[in-house]
Image (cartoon, coloured by chain):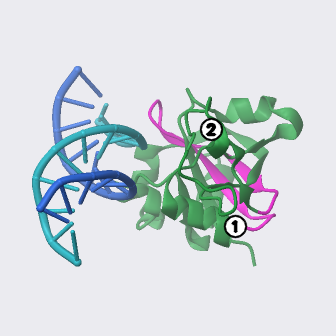
Chain colours: A green, B cyan, C blue
DNA sequence: GCCAACGTTGGC
DNA sequence: GCCAACGTTGGC
């Protein structure tokens, strides 16, 4: 029984095109420094889980589909002093931050813009659309995931 | 354990 | 660039 997810990214930082260009179209989803997001990755994500890929900031919207392709493992950037996500307080024997590998499935020909998503009654209640929603790793209800894919398949 | 201060996110 | 919402930190 797969769970469904949404990953949020600033395209200026890492876009779906960057994922398309990555080796094997796969990337470690590193740099997440939020406990709730960490818990989802570490405790709930499983290989094979589908992922909606969301761009924030510029033309915010759902731009593609990806898949979780690994179990969670410690995020090495937490111990790299050169990395902007360096966390000197994270002990090596009890890593604070985790990541999973994410593989591209599809770049949508017509992304679903945030205003459009907001206009769809069947997506009401979706975490992404809640006021003040900032979580970069979110679970998505099955019904909402299927509604999004239906909108894509009908060329919304 | 409370809460003010601060930093970050992200829509607009 | 503005600002609302949220998370984290740290003094008490």
Q: Position of residue A123 (x, y in %)?
A: 47, 63
Q: Is residue A36 magenta?
A: no
Q: Dividing the image into 4 quarters, which one contains the N terminus of chain A?
A: bottom right
Regarding residue A154, the answer to whether it shows in the image is no
Secondary structure, mark 2, is: strand
N-terminal label among 1 and 2: 1
| Badge 1: chain ID | A
Quarter of the image for residue A38 reads bottom right
Residue at point 74%, 73% (across, down):
A2
Whether labels 1 and 2 share one chain? yes
Foreground mark, 1 or 2, reads 1
Quarter of the image for residue A63 reads top right
Q: Position of residue C7 (x, y in %)?
A: 38, 57
| Image: magenta residue range | A46-71
Q: Is residue A109 above or below residue A136?
A: above
Label 2 Cα crowd, 10 Å radius (few <14 / some 14-19 / many 20+): some
Q: Is residue A62 magenta?
A: yes
Q: Is residue A86 above or below residue A70?
A: above
Task: Say whether residue C6 is left or right of residue A8.
Answer: left
| Badge 2: chain ID | A
Residue receiving disc 2: A110
Residue receiving disc 1: A45
Regarding residue A44, the answer to whether it shows in the image is yes
Label 1 Cα crowd, 10 Å radius (few <14 / some 14-19 / many 20+): many
């Amino acid at each position: 029984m797969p769970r469904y997810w949404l990953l949020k990214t600033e395209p200026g930082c890492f876009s779906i095109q960057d994922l398309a260009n990555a080796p094997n179209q796969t990337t470690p989803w590193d740099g997440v420094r939020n406990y709730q997001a960490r818990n989802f990755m570490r405790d709930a994500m499983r290989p094979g889980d589908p992922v909606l890929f969301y761009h924030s900031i510029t033309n915010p919207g759902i731009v593609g589909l990806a898949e979780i392709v690994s179990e969670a493992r410690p995020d090495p950037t937490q111990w790299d002093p050169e990395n902007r996500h360096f966390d000197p307080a994270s002990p090596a024997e009890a890593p604070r931050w985790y990541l999973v590998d994410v593989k591209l499935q599809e770049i949508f020909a017509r992304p679903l813009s945030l205003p459009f998503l907001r206009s769809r009654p069947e997506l009401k209640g979706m975490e992404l659309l809640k006021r003040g929603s900032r979580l970069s790793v979110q679970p998505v209800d099955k019904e909402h995931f299927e509604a999004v894919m239906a909108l894509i398949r009908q060329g919304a």
